[in-house]
Image (spheres, helix red, strand yellow):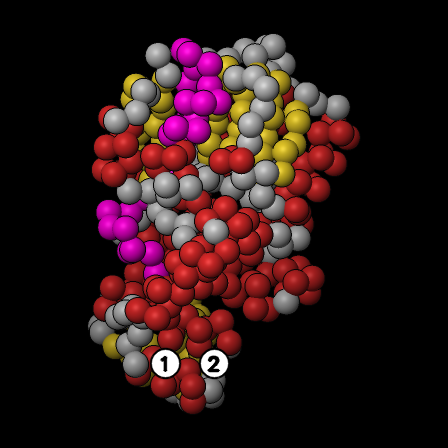
C-alpha cells in the first residue's frame, strides 16, 4: 500500500508504487521520534497530541498497525491493579463513567438519528442507511426474546435509550440499568418527556435485586464490561423467569489481552475486555441456559463503525468548537481504528440468544 511521510512544509517522501493512500505529516520532533520507534501506542499518543497528523485515508493507515509493536507490561498491570484496590464493581463504575459520562450531545453527533444506538446495526446491504440498520436490529432483538405488550424486560446498559424506547413504544415495560450519571440523566429526561413505561436504575447489575423476575433480558454491547462470565450468567438466571430469553451482542477477539494499549488507556480503562466467545460458551455449557443461536456480526460492526467515523468527521467543526480537538482526535482514532479492525478480522462481533428452561 503506497503512503507518504512529510515534515510540515517540506516535500513528502513516498513509499511504495502509485499514488499514496495517506500522508503522515510530522509537525513536532516528538512525532518523528514516535514514528521511528514503530510502537502503536507511541504513535497514537503523538497523533492525540497533534505532533503528527494523517491526511487522506486514516482507515488505510490504521490497517498497517500490525507492523508496529504494542508491548507495554506496565500498562497491562495498571489495568487490573485498580480493581484489586477498589473492588471490581467500583472499578467498573469508574471505567464506564470515563467513557460514557462525556456530554450526551457529543455522542449524538455521530450516532444514528433515529435510535441513538451505540452498538452494531444489522444491514440488509452495505449502502443501507444506518438508521434502517438500527431499526432492523431493534426488531430482531424483540423477536429473539419473544415479548409483547405487557411483558417486562430488563435491559443491561441503557445507553441513550435505543432499545428501551423502541420496546416501550410497542407496549413492553422496560427496566434499564446504567452506571453512568450522564446516561441516567438523559434517559430519565427522555422517558418522562415521552411518557414511556421505562424505569431507569443506576446500579451495577451484580448489585441489582428486584422483587420480581423478568420475562426477558437484553444486553447490547455490555458483555465487554462484564468479563466475569460465570457470575454474569448466574445473575441472569436469578433475574429471569423460567422460559425467558436473553438477547446479547458484543465485539470479540480471539485472545484475552489482545486489545490495544491505546484502547485500554484512552477509551475503555479498567478490566473491560472484548468477548472471548470460546470461553463464554464453556460457561454457558456449565450454566442452566440453553444456547439458541449465535450469529456472526463482524461485517455489520464494520459498516456501523465506518458510518460513525464518517459522521464524526462530518461534525468535526462542531465537536472541536464545543468539546475540543483532543476529544475529536481520540474518538476519530477509536472509530476508524475499530472499522479497520472489523474489516481485517482483527476484531470479531457476535449476537446470540440464551433461554432459561
Whether residue 335 is situated above or below residue 238 in the rendered picture = below
The image shows a total of numbered marks equal to 2
CA gap, disc 2 to disc 1? 9 Å
| Residue 303 in view here | no
In the rendered image, residue 110, in percent from the top left (x then y), is placed at: 56, 49
In the rendered image, residue 28, in percent from the top left (x then y), is placed at: 46, 87
Whether residue 7 is situated above or below residue 112 in the rendered picture = below
| Residue 325 in view here | yes
Name the residue rendered at 41%, 53% in the picture.
271
Q: Which residues are magenta?
A: 233-260
Depth check: give the residue in front, 241 or 16.
241
Classify 10 Å Cα crowding around label 2: few (below 14), some (14-19), many (20 and above). some
Do the numbered discs 2 and 1 sit on residues whose CB atoms are within 8 Å? yes
Residue placed under numbered mark 2 in the picture? 51
Q: On the picture, is 90 further left or further right than 282?
A: right
Quarter of the rendering containing residue 64: bottom left
Classify 10 Å Cα crowding around label 1: few (below 14), some (14-19), many (20 and above). many
Q: Which mark is residue 34?
A: 1
Amino acid at each position: 500500500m503506497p503512503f507518504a511521510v512529510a515534515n510540515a512544509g517540506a516535500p513528502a517522501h513516498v513509499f511504495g508504487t502509485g499514488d499514496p493512500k495517506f500522508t503522515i505529516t510530522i509537525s513536532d520532533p516528538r512525532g518523528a521520534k514516535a514514528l521511528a520507534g514503530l510502537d502503536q501506542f507511541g504513535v497514537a499518543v503523538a497523533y492525540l497530541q497533534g505532533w503528527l497528523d494523517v491526511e487522506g485515508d486514516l482507515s488505510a493507515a490504521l490497517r498497517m498497525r500490525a507492523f508496529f509493536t504494542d508491548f507495554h507490561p506496565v500498562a497491562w498491570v495498571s489495568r487490573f491493579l485498580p480493581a484489586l484496590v477498589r473492588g471490581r464493581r467500583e472499578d467498573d463504575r469508574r471505567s464506564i463513567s470515563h467513557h460514557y459520562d462525556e456530554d450526551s450531545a457529543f455522542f449524538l453527533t455521530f450516532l444514528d438519528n433515529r435510535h441513538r444506538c451505540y452498538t452494531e446495526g444489522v444491514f440488509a446491504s452495505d449502502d443501507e442507511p444506518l438508521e434502517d440498520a438500527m431499526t432492523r436490529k431493534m426488531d430482531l432483538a424483540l423477536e429473539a426474546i419473544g415479548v409483547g405488550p405487557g411483558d417486562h424486560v430488563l435491559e443491561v446498559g441503557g445507553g441513550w435509550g435505543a432499545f428501551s424506547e423502541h420496546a416501550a413504544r410497542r407496549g413492553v415495560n422496560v427496566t434499564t440499568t446504567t452506571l453512568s450519571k450522564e446516561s441516567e440523566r438523559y434517559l430519565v429526561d427522555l422517558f418522562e418527556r415521552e411518557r414511556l413505561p421505562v424505569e431507569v436504575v443506576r446500579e451495577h447489575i451484580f448489585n441489582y435485586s428486584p422483587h420480581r423476575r423478568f420475562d426477558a433480558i437484553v444486553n447490547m454491547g455490555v458483555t465487554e464490561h462484564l468479563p466475569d462470565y460465570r457470575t454474569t450468567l448466574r445473575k441472569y438466571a436469578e433475574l429471569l423467569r423460567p422460559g425467558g430469553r436473553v438477547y446479547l451482542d458484543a465485539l470479540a477477539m480471539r485472545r484475552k489481552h489482545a486489545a490495544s494499549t491505546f484502547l485500554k488507556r484512552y477509551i475503555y480503562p479498567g478490566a473491560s475486555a472484548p468477548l472471548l466467545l470460546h470461553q463464554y460458551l464453556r460457561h454457558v455449557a456449565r450454566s442452566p441456559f440453553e444456547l439458541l443461536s449465535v450469529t456472526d456480526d463482524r461485517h455489520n460492526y464494520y459498516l456501523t463503525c465506518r458510518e460513525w467515523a464518517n459522521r464524526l468527521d462530518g461534525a468535526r467543526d462542531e465537536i472541536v468548537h464545543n468539546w475540543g480537538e483532543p476529544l475529536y482526535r481520540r474518538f476519530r482514532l477509536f472509530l476508524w481504528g475499530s472499522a479497520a479492525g472489523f474489516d481485517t478480522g482483527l476484531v470479531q462481533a457476535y449476537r446470540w440468544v440464551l433461554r432459561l428452561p
